[in-house]
Image (spheres, rainbow, N blue to C red):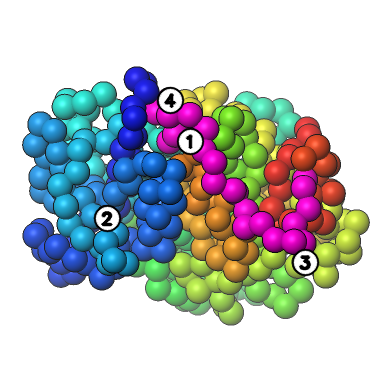
Amino acid sequence: MRAHATPALAILARPPSPSEEQPGESSPSLLPEDRFCRELCRMGAELGMIVYVVYAHPAWAALSETELTGYALQGGRWTEKRWPLPDLVYDRAIGANPAERQAKAGLLKQLAERKPLTPLNGSLPGKLAVYEALRTDQRLRPALPPTFAYPGTSSLQRLALRFPRGVFLKPDAGYQGRGAIAITARDGLWRAEGRTIGNAAVARTFTNAAACAAWCERFIRAAYIAQPYLPLRNESGASCDIRSLIQKDERGRWRITGIAVREGAPGSVTSNLHGGGEAKDAAAVLAARFGEAAARRLLLRTARLSLRASRALEQHFGRFFELGLDFGLEASGRLWLLEANAKPGRMSFYARPAIYRLAVLRPLQAAMRLAGAGRTVLSPVPLSSHHRSTRGSTYTQQARYHRGCIQEVHP
């Protein structure tokens, strides 16, 4: 990309539904991922960038040959304004249905027709394709649970026999744990627990496999994948997983930004924060559960698997600068690599200011690098008299300095 004196970064956000807002609203009180977008705009301004939010729909963007409509902060409020066409696009719009995905594709096509455009991050295909890509790395294979396309309810009983603990079904193109369902069979009763596509909790009990299969037939409305239902619960019985946020630093090298444990709401089979889960400091939780030494080994293994997974996904699907990797953890300490997310959130790190700030800064560093605008100068973490340098330190040393925030990974 040609160096630009003032790089312009557009953040694509999911457009509001007709019942929420209408085109022409000049000052929405909140935008999707409001806190994250506010921080990106503030820190971008400090770095000398133009950063604004655009709804991922041509009707909202209202493109001309040189400008589009977006939102930026003015006096702490979102204000609508015409902005120059962006040099880079940070796509945060999930595209929850075909209409939203089509609208976003239309907007990106129109932008590309007017100006050379660089996506800040890549995109991932469905979960099954991601699984198959990860399996090409022999060192990742032991950490991947068996995953295959769900063949339909006629095979439900056969799957239950193959996986005695149960079967876990989730949409191939799902997000935030929506639509995920666990099927278990005990003492002649069949149990289905999970979340609807609308993210509401659901639990049903059936007296036989046929009744459970008939319910699944109505529940499943898209392509699904099937996995064994793994015992991924903590000592209190709550579902839990580990979120690893891996991003590239200002030099374009993969770095672990933070690792958090997410614990699900009571009775939930998923631990996603959007479904009522809670994020906690990984080092503290793992140390309390397994001991300090075992916790350090688990964090190191999580970091190494994250690095290998990120490289494998780049080899198959093109350039990325950030990924969210979700790991399951059994009571024995065995780690499972469950999912990869190309639009990772930051909610898991809200309670860790240093990690959260770094997680916001790194997209801007990536944008500056891709725009050829030179290196950023913002400090990645708030400095204090108690801050210690981690330059040249090992992973375990850094884990002591920034519990949960890892800057170096040595495979």
Q: Secondary structure at mark 3?
A: helix
Residue 369: give x, y in percent of width and height. 47, 30
Q: Amino acid at mark 4?
A: Gly
SS type, badge 2: strand
Magenta part of the chain: 366-390
Which comes before the other along the chain, label 2 or label 1? Answer: 2
Tell us which disc is closer to us: 4 or 3.
4
Q: Give residue 14's position: percent from left, percent from top.
A: 28, 54
At horizontal 25% and vertical 70% (from top left) the residue drawn is 29
Majority SS type along the magenta span: loop
Q: Amino acid at mark 3?
A: Ala
Q: Which residue is mark 1?
A: 366
Residue 348 visible within the image: yes
159 relative to 242 in the view: left or right: left
Q: Could you tell me if the residues under marks 4 and 3 are in contact, i.e. CB atoms within 8 Å?
A: no
Residue 131: image x %, image y %?
56, 37
Q: CA distance from mark 2 to mark 1?
A: 20 Å
The residue positioned 33% from the left and 46% from the top of the image is 51
Q: Is residue 134 visible?
A: no
Residue sitting at x 43%, y 36%: 367
- Describe residue 244's horizontal placement relative to residue 293 as left or right: left
- Residue 319 appears left or right of 231: left
The crowding category of the residue bearing disc 2, from other C-alpha atoms within 10 Å (few below 14, some 14 to 19, many at least 20), is many
Label 3 sits on residue? 284
Indicate the amino acid at tag 2: Ala
Disc sitting over residue 188 in the figure? none
